[in-house]
Amino acid sequence: MESDLLKKMLRDMLLARAFEERAAQAYAQGDIAGFLHLYPGEEAVGVGVLHAAEPADYVVSTYREHVHALVRGVPASTVMAELFGRKTGCSGGMGGSMHLFDRERRFMGGYAIVGETFPVATGIGYAIAMRELPEAVICFFGDGAVNQGTFHESLNMAALWKLPVLFVCENNHYQIGTEIHRHSAVAEVYKRACGYRIPARRVDGMDVLTVHQAAQEALAQIRAGNGPQFIECETYRFRGHSMADPGSYRPRVELQAFEKNEDPVKIAIAETAAAYPSAEQIAAVGRDNIASLAGSLHRGGHISTAHLDAMQAEVAAQVEEAVRFAAASPEPTLEDAQAALDCNRQGEVLV
Amino acid sequence: MAEAIFYWQALNRALDTRMAADESIVVLGEDVGLYGGSYRVTEGLYAKYGEWRVRDTPISEGSFTGLGVGAAMVGLRPVVEIMTINFALLALDAIINMAAKIPFMSGGQFPMPLVVRMPGGVAKQLAAQHSQRLEQTLMNVPGLRIAVPATPQDAYWQLCQAISSDEPIVLLEHELLYFSKGELDESRPPPPMHRAELCRPGRNLTIVTYSRMRDLALKAAMQLAETGIEAEVIDLRSLRPIDWDCCVASLEKTHRLLIVEEDSGFAGAGAEISAGLTERCFAILDAPPRRVAAEELPIAYNAALEAASIPQVADVVRASQQLCRS
């Protein structure tokens, strides 16, 4: 792992966490309304996958997509402005939290109907395959979405025509309030892809390195012409389904355990921080792997506490600036709404 | 030069002409390729353009229509065929939640050059699940345009225009019209896709209709003429938007409105036409608008019941006479 890439991923995870916590605050203050689905706990998935993608790749996402957009390079200011419903938002204030779009960055939207990302991604993949381009589509979805018909229909078509789609399941174990063993006959989501002969694997979605490596390998397969690939990332959301959800259906001890031991940001910091392996780590790995573990930590690390603090201050400032930008931005008008609807009318005047 | 061809041939000609000119046009649907389409509309295209441009899909209406949406977002011009409109209920999420809303909710960033073609209406004893239309559902969706061609010429024009458009367009075809013949002149310049056609001038009442009911209305108008009633007949050609100007101009002359639709009347297309024209023409109407529509029943398999459930020429004649007496 290159040190630069690791630092970039850590920075994006810190930005993601800071952005979402600030959005929650703005929601509580009444600046953001509607449904707001936050990402804390799941950062390693979006960051790991999207850092493995190329700028020419397309991203199709769900209603929990702020961080996907941010990592894709959509400025925090225009994402926050969209959450505020302002004209300067990345969807002009028409979409809101669940419908972020950025054509230039090939961010093909957040979709608020569970299971819609599959056909959209498959269609983009169809266009890529037909034109024989070296591009791929990344299709995000949650564990609840795999019970929709579109999951099965789209995976079938993607496999049948060998479309360049990377299916990424963000398995946070809850379909809103229903735990996966209560909503899925097969709780190992990746196994469902096997029914369509799509290579699939399950990875630790709390570890950004693991996710990144899996996504890199899958994208390499796609670019080699081997058709769609599937990664299930096991993760956990620290907050409720949305800001409207107190999350009372989850055992408190479960949430605490994840927050304490599985926080992906803490894991990323630990992986990035300059450190020699502890005696316990060395003992756990065993003698043969000592050299490789020490080597990878050396290569991957070299970030000082001061550097980490500076990074955190930088993302905090960026998020505050985004809030200032959003709050100062104008509201869209009804004329703007009509223009958005008529954007493809080519000037034709109707009756 | 004009020639008499079938409605399905006109659609086929439109697809072929446009596909030859534009490589980004792809046709998707069940049995559109090797089989040539269940109503022959895509006949010959698979051999000519290959499987990537004429794609036989699995029976997955929701996802292959959604696939069309995704492909349209990145510059293809998909023409999705849903074998019959009855199956489009499974694709409504793609049509309504995706195709109609993505251009808007992205703040105008994404074009949606998607055409969804679907045959519908009451055909011949296909029973309740294969004998309906959905215009009333789709008409209520801002962001969609709906064309309802009734003649081979309109089928050709409106499909060509729909393919060229960057807006999502639903083409509602009629199963009984595919093998009806009419003149097609490819060289004639088309009117705008949403423009209504005044197909018969008259002075005593205006019959506003669309799709297969156009023929019925024209036949009724001929019978009415024998009894001294001159009906003006307007084929709307488009249900969203509706060409109000054409209808208003006619009502300024006739002062009486009859709407003929094949579907059930309750909350149907005719209700919107009636409301829209009443708002615009209340002061000049000599009688309340009247609708001839299907019974409030699912369509029965039995042939006599099927015929009795939907408007016939005699129903239109009778309603016109009553309207002119009121």
Image (cartoon, grey):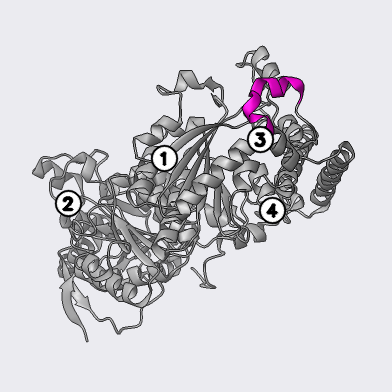
Tell me: A204 left or right of B184: right
Q: CA distance from mark 2 to mark 3?
A: 73 Å
Q: Quadrant of residue A205?
A: top right
Mark nearer the viewer, 2 or 3: 3
In the image, are marks 1 and 3 on the same chain?
yes
Q: Residue at x 17, y 65 (%)?
A: B219
Same chain? Circles 4 and 2 = no
Does residue A340 lie above or below A26 as drawn?
below
Q: Amino acid at mark 3?
A: Ser
Q: Which residue is mark 1?
A: A199
Q: Decide which of B109, B199 is in the foreground and name it.
A: B109
Distance CA(mark 4)–CA(mark 2):
52 Å
The answer to whether A186 is drawn above or below residue B253 in the figure is above
**Which of A273/A93 is in front?**
A273
The reply to whether discs 4 and 3 touch (Cβ–Cβ < 8 Å) is no
- Residue behind mark 3: A292
Q: Which mark is residue A74?
A: 4
Mark closer to the chain start, 4 or 3: 4
Q: Which mark is nearer the camera, 4 or 2?
A: 4
Query: x, y percentage for residue A173?
Result: 55, 24
Q: Amino acid at mark 1?
A: Pro
For disc 3, the neighbor class at 10 Å (few under 14, some 14 to 19, many from 20) is few
Q: Which mark is residue B72?
A: none
* Disc 1 to disc 4, C-alpha distance: 31 Å
Subunit of mark 1?
Answer: A
Nearest to viewer (mark 4 / mark 3):
3
Q: From which residue to which does the magenta span run?
A: A278-291
**Mark 2, residue position:** B123
Q: Position of residue B141 (x, y in %)?
A: 47, 51
> For the residue labelled by badge 2, is the local secondary structure a helix, a strand or a loop?
loop
